[in-house]
Image: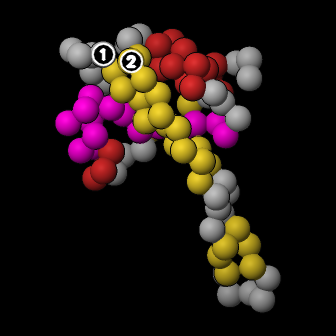
Amino acid sequence: MQNLSHVIKTIRLSEKASLLTEKNNSYVFEVHPKSTKQEIAQAVRAAFGKKVVSVNTANYAGKARRQRTPQAGRTADWKKAVVKLAPGEKIDLA
């Protein structure tokens, strides 16, 4: 993946993500499924100007859904990245 602007799709705001932010100084992002840990770290550095300590990733399969029709559909597959920042670093989400 060449373009770092396409790596980070959105930041995930949930109860678990906010607990990770408070306890571990980690932030949760939804990223492009083919992006690597190194690309995610570079994208966070470029977008927010913060020092990244570690990146953990997890792939999620889409779920089967049915919408009032006999045909079943699926939600999209996605990838989650938990990015830990250096002590003292913080991303302002407001």
Residue 94 visible to the viewer = no
Please identify the quarter of the rendering in which residue 38 is found.
top right
Q: Residue at x 59, y 54 (%)?
A: 60
Q: Nearer the viewer, residue 18 or 37?
A: 37
8 relative position to 28: left or right: right
- For residue 53, the mark is 2
**Region rendered in magenta:** 18-33
The vertical placement of 36 against 75, above or below, is above
Please identify the quarter of the rendering in which residue 73 is found.
bottom right
Q: Nearer the viewer, residue 35 or 68?
A: 35
Q: Amino acid at mark 1?
A: Ala
The vertical placement of 92 against 29, above or below, is above
74 relative position to 24: left or right: right
Which residue is situated farthest in the right direction here?
71
User: Which quadrant of the figure contains the N terminus?
Assistant: top right
6 relative position to 82: left or right: right
Give coordinates of residue 77: x percent, y percent: 66, 54
Q: Nearer the viewer, residue 80 or 11?
A: 80
Give coordinates of residue 82: x percent, y percent: 43, 35
Mark closer to the chain start, 2 or 1: 2
Q: Residue at x 61, y 20 (%)?
A: 39
Q: Secondary structure at mark 2?
A: strand
Q: Inspect the magenta stretch and tell me whether residue 8 lies in it.
A: no
- Give the number of marks: 2
Residue at mark 1: 86
